[in-house]
Image (spheres, coloured by chain):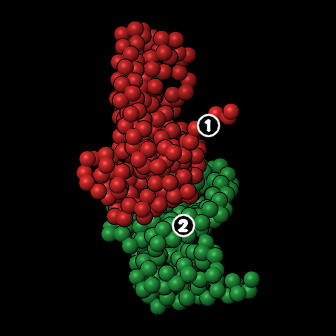
Amino acid sequence: MSALLRALMALLRRDLLLAMRRRQDALVVLGFFVVVVSLFPLGVGPDPQLLRSMAPGVLWVSALLATMLSLERLFADDFRDGSLEQLLLTPQPLPLLVLMKILAHWLVTGLPLVLISPLLGMQLNLDGTEIAVLMMALLLGTPILSLVGAIGAGLTLGLRGGGVLISLLILPLYVPALIMGAGAVDAVMYGSSPDAHLSLLAALLIFTLLLAPWAIAAALRIMLD
Amino acid sequence: MAQPRVQWFKFSSPPNFYDLSGRLIPWFGGLAAILCVAGLYVGFVVAPPDYQQGDSYRIMFIHVPAAWMSMFLYVLMAVYAAIGLIWRVKTAEVMAKAIAPTGALFAFLCLWTGALWGKPTWGTYWVWDARLTSQLILLFLYLGYMALHGAIEDRQRAANASAVLALAGVVNVPIIYFSVVWWNTLHQGASITVTSAPTMETVMFVALMLMTFACWMYAIAVVLWRARLELLERERRAKWVLERMGGKA
């Protein structure tokens, strides 16, 4: 058991270290998120009321697209230098190893989105409680995006134009997270409780956490066969 | 003396599947044509106009079967994909691939006829109704499946990878459906309900059933046909293909 834990921690440390060495990859995703959200007012006009009512959707769709962008990188580098193959050969269960990789990915790309969202929320005229709910929803939702997205990243491993293909495969599967996440902020905006949305989002996270690693592991085994 | 049991698994071997489906396709195709003509006749000539919607309701006779087929075919595709993935049955893999375009066609047909029906009835081609939205997402799922299958060159790998996608999709379909329904009831946009339709007359019901079976027969015939061609292509170096194509081994 401790050998397993050691292996998992080593993998997590390695992935985080690699991410720290290439800080730009994570920063680009964050920059994309900020730029896309900032472009919306230029497209729809500066009316504060309109921006406020659009804010949950805009922030969530932008977070979705930003995650999408980062997914291509998730397994690609390890695939190219052969370390992914080594990972498949280890005696440790692959779903757990994959889960660690996704945790590292989320810490590097998902968590920064959550942390910067208050700033963008203020830009779009959200008030204090709404921003708190937005952060909570993103905190529960971005891991779902990483987990489901990793299935797509696994399935498109080594394909030409994999990045575009991932979006076609995965974006339809993001619909529930988008609805619950944006719905939570909407609910508090119209004076009702966001609890139902947040609970469903949490349930979805648990469900995804349970099933996605197996699907990802299967996808990796197929594509590296 | 005990009767010899039917060897169902026999038909999962490519040559047997090829021969059997070759014999069955004309029957299913013929039935589809007959049922379609009968259904259209009952639907357009015998059935009376609706007292609320006039004649525009008649598009339902193709719209409703298309919606049913698109949903059912997705589940069927996932079942075949799972069989192919777990037991490595080549015929099942081929069937899963063959179902996808027909399913996508029905999903598209459902959306298209729905839009044409919506214009005279609701006054708009498109509303963000829960059913329309989830049907649209179903079409996207079909397109994603086909895109992934097409993007991977190795046939075996393509079959396995898209099988994983089909299974991930089928687990998600109910979640997507309920979240969309919930989203729709919260957003109270265009509050049009399709569910509170008046009870149907028997003639209309008969026409609908005829068309549903016509769609079934059509889907079976086309899917088997596509699966046959795919099998031939996959097994083009196998002896049974050369025998049937009159080539030399």
The residue tagged 1 is B4
Q: Position of residue A59 (x, y in %)?
A: 48, 62
Q: Position of residue A158 (x, y in %)?
A: 38, 73
- 2 or 1: mark nearer the eye: 1
Image quarter for residue A215? bottom right
Chain letter belonging to callout 2: A
Q: Residue at x 51, y 58 (%)?
A: B88
Determine the colour of chain A.
Answer: green
Chain letter belonging to callout 1: B
Q: Which chain is red?
A: B
Res B95 visible: yes
The residue tagged 2 is A218
Q: Is residue B165 above or below residue B182?
A: below
Q: Amino acid at mark 1?
A: Pro
- Nearest the viewer among A19 and A189 is A19
> Within 10 angstroms of label 1, few (less than 14), some, or many (20 or more) residues?
few
Q: Secondary structure at mark 2?
A: helix
Q: Amino acid at mark 2?
A: Ala
- Nearest the viewer among B1 and B85 is B1
Q: Residue at x 64, y 33 (%)?
A: B3
Label total for image: 2
Q: Position of residue B95 (x, y in %)?
A: 44, 47
The N terminus of chain B, quarter of image: top right
Left-right relation of B158 to A173:
left
- Nearest the viewer among B60 and B72 is B72
Q: Secondary structure at mark 1?
A: loop
Q: Residue furthest left?
A: B247
